[in-house]
Structures are given as structure tokens and as C-alpha cells.
Amino acid sequence: MRPFLIAFLVCFSLPSFADEGAAPVLGALTAEDIQDARQRLLELGGPDAALLDASGCKMCSKGKACGDSCISRDKQCRKGVGCACDG
């Protein structure tokens, strides 16, 4: 009876994150934080702005550009304009 009581108390005394998703990690950056920082760096301009803007884009050597990624040359692209480039 005692082990059952201890297990019961432990299970119900811990906080539940089921409704909120995973517990946040202290100091973890969100996608919004990363996008805001990237936008601020681009607004500063300078010679590195073009490199920063192109750093997340793919260069398609075997396939062709389709949105932000590469697809096979024999397929038809159904995505809008992205940052991938034909290489």
C-alpha cells in the first residue's frame, strides 16, 4: 500500500505540461526571435547583408529551384517564388 501511495503522490504533485506542449527551455530561441534578429541584421545593411540573406537558401545543382527547396528537373513546381536558386 505504501509504494502505491508514494507513486500516487509523485504523479499528481508534478506539474502537467500536456496542455502547453513541452516545457520551455531556459534561454531557448523561438522562430520569431530568430526571424526578428535576422530582419534587424538585414536592416543594418552593409556588405554582409547579401550573404546573410542568401545564407538560408539552397543552391540546386542536380534539380531545379522550387520555392525554398530543390526538386527533380522532370517535375513541375507548384510552389510560389522562394529563395532557392538554380546552380
Image: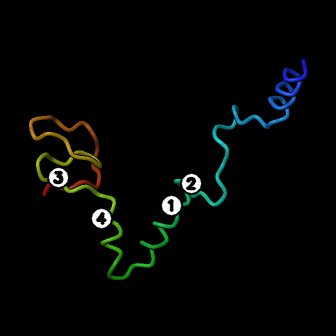
Q: Nearer the viewer, residue 4 or 67?
A: 4
Query: Which quadrant holds the C terminus?
Result: bottom left
Pick whichever of labels 4 and 2 is earlier in the sequence: 2
Q: Are marks 4 and 1 in contact (CB under 8 Å)?
A: no
Which residue position is annotated with label 2? 30
Vertical side of 78 occupied by 36: above or below? below
Which residue position is annotated with label 4? 54
Can you name the residue that lies furthest to the top here?
1
Which residue position is annotated with label 1? 34
Which residue occupies 9% across, 36% down? 74
**Is residue 15 toward the left or the right of residue 69 in the image?**
right
The kind of residue tagged 3 is Cys
**Is residue 5 toward the left or the right of residue 48 in the image?**
right
CA gap, disc 2 and disc 1: 6 Å
Pick whichever of labels 4 and 1 is earlier in the sequence: 1
Q: Secondary structure at mark 2?
A: loop
Q: Where residue 75 appears, x then y in whole percent?
A: 14, 34
Q: Are marks 2 and 1 in contact (CB under 8 Å)?
A: yes
Q: Where residue 46 appears, x then y in whole percent?
A: 37, 82
Which residue occupies 67% across, 44% down? 23
CA gap, disc 3 and disc 4: 13 Å
Can you name the residue that lies furthest to the bottom here?
46
Q: Mark 4 or 2, which is nearer the eye? A: 2
Pick whichever of labels 3 and 2 is earlier in the sequence: 2
Q: Where residue 7 appears, x then y in whole percent?
A: 82, 26
